[in-house]
Amino acid sequence: MDRATYQRLYDALATYADVQRIAHAEHRDEELLFVIHTHRVTRDATRRFYVVKRQIGRLAAQWKRGRTILETAHEWRFPPVLMGQLMLGELGVPRKRVWQTFLHPETAPDARLRQEVEALLEVDMIYSPKGLELQRERGRKGEERMHRWLDRHGIGFRTEKDLRGKYQKTPDALLDEPIVFFGQKLTWLESKANFGDDVELRKNLRRQLGPYTELFGEGAVIYWYGYVDGAESPPGILLWDGATFEGITPVVKEPPARAHAGHPTRDHARPPHPGSPPEDPRSAPGGSHDGPPP
């Protein structure tokens, strides 16, 4: 996708209703648009998380006077479940019980909060337990597609589960034997059920892909929803979109001795510039790996 189109969509996809509207009007894949919408929402929430948190005392006072949490979330253009978690914490719900309340609304302290939590869960397609599970399911499907491709070509590999405890960081598939693509020997593959814009690429490089090359050598990452045209990757990491990857027939053998091959084509290999992307609010201080921060 060219950068101008991506930026236009990113700016336009403020709500889930925008996803559905643009998918219908422009005949675009709704799942891809939802992935781009998720980028926008999570990054904006990260950027403004502490701005909202500093106001939560005043917002809780408004709630006590009858305003709903959902109304407050809409006014602040903040993810409803995140707003609800901040609000419940301010209202005295113990931190460990906050996320449990969103998993099981019937455990809310009173009937009003139960009704409000249920309303927040209904409209939040990203930070609700249902939304988080949809994200995990996209990830599982991407890994399964990659594993089927490896099996189809008779390529042995070990998964993160197989390698657990053996290395500090492990890719989704560490190959038993390298595969060769345009003279480049690849020893690992990583699956990303995501769209690779510049922020995402920088984050993945810093947290995962760079360490993989240090530990295992050259490899490739598959962005199942594509990536922006002109994206660049450092030497040793190929970028593939899903369609490119599934159309490849690999060579399973050592390449002849040669100088390092450059990236084969603009469609096959592009890596990220190093940098520091914004943190996801789910891993911000006070957050949880099991759900968004309270």
Image (tube, rainbow, N blue to C red):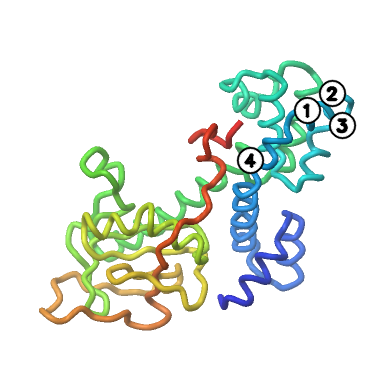
Q: What's the CA distance linking mark 1 and mark 2?
A: 6 Å
Q: How many marks?
A: 4
User: Which of label 4 and label 3 is nearer to you?
Assistant: 4
Q: Which mark is residue 126?
A: none
Instruction: Tell me, yes or no, if residue 156 can be seen here.
Output: no
Q: Nearer the viewer, residue 24 or 199?
A: 199
Q: Check disc 1 and give the amino acid type.
A: Ala
**From what the image shows, is residue 74 above or below residue 245?**
above
Label 1: how many Cα within 10 Å (few below 14, some 14–19, many 20+): many
User: Which of label 4 and label 1 is nearer to you?
Assistant: 4
Q: Check disc 4 and give the amino acid type.
A: Tyr
Label 3: how many Cα within 10 Å (few below 14, some 14–19, many 20+): few
Q: Which mark is residue 64?
A: 2
Q: What is the x, y in percent for residue 109?
A: 72, 16
Considering the image in quadrants, where does the N terminus appear?
Answer: bottom right
Residue at figure coordinates x 69%, y 65% from the top left: 11
The residue at which mark 1 appears reads as 60
Q: What's the CA distance linking mark 3 and mark 1?
A: 9 Å
Q: Which mark is residue 67?
A: 3
Label 2: how many Cα within 10 Å (few below 14, some 14–19, many 20+): few
Asked whether the beta carbons under mark 1 and mark 2 sit within 8 Å of each other, the answer is yes
Q: Nearer the viewer, residue 91 or 100?
A: 91
